[in-house]
Amino acid sequence: MARSRAERVLPLAKVVLFAACLAPCGLLVWDAVSGSLGPNPVEALLHGTGDWALRLLLVTLAMTPLRRLTGQVWPIRLRRMLGLFAFFYVALHLTVYLWLDRELAWSTIVDDVIKRPYISVGFVAFLMLIPLALTSTRGWMRRLGRRWTQLHRAVYVIAVLGVVHYLWLVKADLREPLIYASVLTILLAFRVPWDRLGAMLRGVRVGRSGP
Amino acid sequence: TAIPNVRPSPFSTDEQRTSLDDVTHYNNFYEFGTEKSDPAANAGTLKTRPWTLVVDGACEAPGEIGIEDLLSGFTQEERVYRLRCVEAWAMVVPWVGFPLGDLLRRFKPTSKARYVAFETLLDPEQMPGQRRSVLDWPYREGLRMDEAMHPLTILATGLYGELLPNQNGAPLRLVVPWKYGFKSIKSIVRIRFTEREPQATWNMMQPDEYGFYANVNPAVDHPRWSQKKHRVIGEGLFARKHETLPFNGYGDQVASLYSGMDLRRYF
């Protein structure tokens, strides 16, 4: 079977994507080293890593709709890398919080996680991402079979928690978190089996169909 | 523009001053945007001359006073104060200004004047942030009369020896160094003596998060973060945070204003 053009381009696309995903981290490190993170560098790192975690999570969630819209398979082939980079930025975000922001003062961290809902929600989202990152390999996909798909649907909940985490921490100006919320809503709406739902509402029984 | 004849003050701290660059580029002034960098970028549209302050309410001599008269009619002092934001960061700012009490006395408040209410300019043309209803404009704040008359409470006209930059609340702002920064209302156009506790913008919006008194108090957490420590702006990425002191370290001068009050309830 001849390899399609997409198949041949894929390795290159992966290299480019890898570099692109690493770039925000590189820029933050560069700014930190050169002292150009602004008057409050810890806050800049905290917000920078958080923003990119959320953005990459949404980009990851855009891959399935993209496959359906384009009819191409490459979005799915890039999905794992995007998801793992989302986890990478979440881990960086948490590290900056624990180390630079909270100064590893564990009692205040426990206090935060228990008493402050926006932190609880962010922390739960991080915990939920761990099993997804661990089972992202081909071997685990094979071993878990259909349960792998079920497990990885947790990413929908994680993304919602991530957006709520952002919404709850903002003082007054909800514009930016609401942009993330809107994008997420659109991406999740793609997952709803509207045709089946419509058929159900019309009282028509249909069998399982489609991919 | 340099302010002439600025006198030093015994109320100044000798702590390391935050750089002019940080003081003027890390601001909460939602009238020009909600990012810390927005005011420096957007406040150029504010016209600070002419500028008239209206003083009225429960007083015998209500009236107006222009900014030039405020600058020439009151002895300008340098007051180097700690500034503690409710968001758990802090600065040390060399303000120029004069005691609020000196101004208030000229308008002869009556015995009914128990509070002082302040209002920021309302003009979405000059203050683009007001085109969106992020806050209930105009920004309002208030002090109890004894707080307003306290010698530490000043109206600032400048910083680092020069007229206030727009992003710091030009041409006239309040500075109450023992309270969280949001009490120190910027670009004031009106002061009113009132009998009842006046409205305060953040307090109206989130009364469980922002109290009317808003005295710096490490024992009362903001619901979404601890107030026990704060970060001092300009100390760098790996600097340790500082312990927050009651009344921002001005307890010796102001704690007596609140004797007998439950500061957990009246936070």
Image (cartoon, coloured by chain):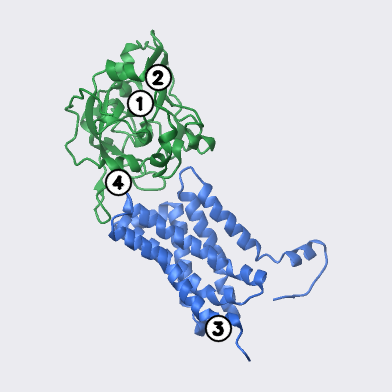
Chain colours: A blue, B green
Q: Mark 3 vs mark 1: same chain? A: no
Quadrant containing the N terminus of chain B in the rendered view: top left
Q: Which mark is residue B228?
A: 4
Q: Tell me, yes or no, if residue B235 can be seen here.
A: yes
Residue appearing at x 39%, y 61% in the figure:
A93
Q: Position of residue B44 (x, y in %)?
A: 41, 35
Question: Given the image, on which type of amino acid does mark 2 rest?
Answer: Leu
Local crowd size for mark 2, using a 10 Å CA cut-off: few (<14), some (14–19), many (≥20): some
Q: Nearer the viewer, mark 4 or mark 1?
A: 1
Which residue lies under the disc numbered 2?
B53
Q: Chain of mark 2?
A: B
Question: Given the image, on which type of amino acid does mark 4 rest?
Answer: Lys
Asked if labels 3 and 4 touch by Cβ distance under 8 angstroms, the answer is: no
Question: Given the image, on which type of amino acid does mark 1 rest?
Answer: Leu
Q: Chain of mark 4?
A: B
SS state under label 1: loop
SS state under label 4: loop
Q: Mark 3 vs mark 2: same chain? A: no
Question: Given the image, on which type of amino acid does mark 3 rest?
Answer: Arg
Q: Chain of mark 3?
A: A
Which residue lies under the disc numbered 3?
A8
